[in-house]
Image: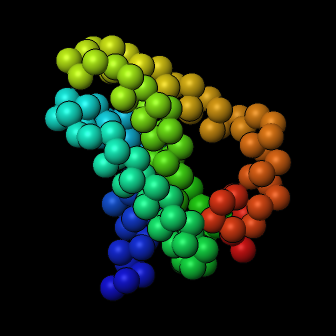
Amino acid sequence: MIKKLNILMLTMLGVGHSKYAPGTVASFITCLIYILFFNLKINIIFLILAVSLIIIYSVYSIDNYANSFSETDAKEIVIDEFIGQSIPVLTIYSFLEKNNLDGFILYTFTSFILFRIFDIYKPYPINKIDQNIKNGFGGNFR
């Protein structure tokens, strides 16, 4: 039961099992979640605390459940897309006026496009970190 819950978390409730571009789908869904949160005026402090807990939990889960996936850097694990996409969105979240939903949507989707480009091409120094760290912080788990 615990293993299934951890795998659900790592795959963002199964989004990672998407047949096409699971990382992109996960990033897009993350953007939609934040647009909903912004529209509902969820407190930024709560969101930062929640993402911080997700980071800690996901590093632990990746370290302990990576062998449950068929590849070393399994495409099904998309919680890192949620976390990575959260960073630029949360950066602007508190700076925009709460009634500027159009501006937030524009910024969110701009950050989505830029995040996907950087996540796919992994420029230096991120590519070195991804290649050399062998735990939940990097791309090599085993």
Q: Position of residue 35 (x, y in %)?
A: 28, 31
On the picture, is 30 further left or further right than 70? Answer: left
Q: How is the image coloured?
A: rainbow
Above or below, 51 against 30 in this view is below
Give the farthest residue toward the left.
40
Q: Position of residue 47 (x, y in %)?
A: 34, 46
Q: Is residue 2 visible?
A: yes
Q: Nearer the viewer, residue 39 or 10?
A: 39
Q: Quadrant of residue 67?
A: bottom right
At x 69% / y 68%, what residue is drawn? 135
Give the farthest residue toward the bottom.
1
State which quarter of the image contains the C terminus.
bottom right
At x 20% / y 18%, what residue is drawn? 99
Q: Quadrant of residue 3?
A: bottom left
Above or below, 2 against 44 in this view is below
Q: Is residue 18 visible?
A: no
Q: Nearer the viewer, residue 42 or 37?
A: 42
Q: Position of residue 86 (x, y in %)?
A: 45, 41
At x 53% / y 52%, what residue is drawn? 80
Q: Position of residue 56 (x, y in %)?
A: 51, 64
Q: Quadrant of residue 71?
A: bottom right
Q: Nearer the viewer, residue 118 or 49?
A: 49
Above or below, 91 against 83 in this view is above
At x 82% / y 58%, what residue is drawn? 132
Above or below, 14 against 107 in this view is below
